[in-house]
Amino acid sequence: MYASLRLFAAAALIVDGAVVQAQTAPARPAAAKTTPAPSTPEFTGAVADQAAYKVVYQLDSDDPKLIRMTLRNMKNALEDPRLKGKLQMELVAYGGGTDVFRKAQPYEPELLALKEKGVILAQCLNTMKERSISKEELFPFIFYVPTGNGELIIRQTQGWAIVHP
């Protein structure tokens, strides 16, 4: 029963009154000398090997810093040389994100620049109804979708990447 007992410490063990000598752990082989890995080319990011890419940016916050960051990220993606001319983009605003489309807010120049590059600017009608926001309060160049979440679900199912800054 105890014949297969292996110990890896330098000590004796008493089993049923008999002294059983402990075995020491087997010596490990000397570490093999390593040679440096062959030099690899510098990493330059993912390769845009598809003919087209589709992305929808989700905006549900009225935080001005987050709104500005989202608009800047969208502009940067459109200017990425790997994606230039291959990118279809949409901005879906709902909840607090509706502020991006309000005439009283300072985002019109950035939005018009995105629209000129073919970006779809979509506002959730459900949010407008819940918050009693009229279309007259928003820029005239935006589009409307029944629900922001519905738009995201449909786009994702259609293969669009979703970015939520």
Image (spheres, grey):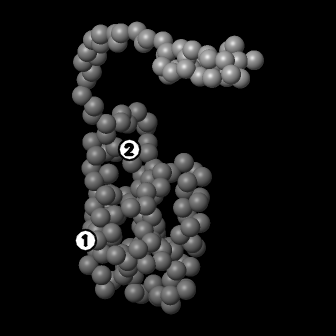
Residue at horizontal 43 percent and vertical 61 percent from the top: 164
Q: Identify the amino acid type marked 2.
A: Lys
Q: Residues within 10 Å of mark 1 (few under 14, many from 20)?
A: few
Task: Check disc 2 and report the residue beneath it.
Answer: 86
Residue 26 higher or lower than 67, as above or below: above
Tell me the number on the disc at residue 42: none
Horizontally, is 8 left or right of 103 in the view? right
Q: What secondary structure is marked by label 1?
A: helix
Residue contact at pointers 2 and 1, CB within 8 angstroms: no
Q: Quadrant of the N terminus?
A: top right
Residue at horizontal 51 percent and vertical 74 percent from the top: 124
Q: Residue most toward the front?
A: 17
Percent of width and height locating residue 94:
48, 74
Task: Check disc 1 and report the residue beneath it.
Answer: 109
| Residue 22 in sight from this viewpoint | yes
Percent of width and height locating residue 77:
32, 51
Q: Residues within 10 Å of mark 2 (few under 14, many from 20)?
A: some
Q: Identify the amino acid type marked 1.
A: Pro
Q: Nearer the viewer, residue 106 or 17?
A: 17
| Residue 120 in sight from this viewpoint | no
Q: Nearer the viewer, residue 94 or 2?
A: 2
Residue at horizontal 50 percent and vertical 51 percent from the top: 160
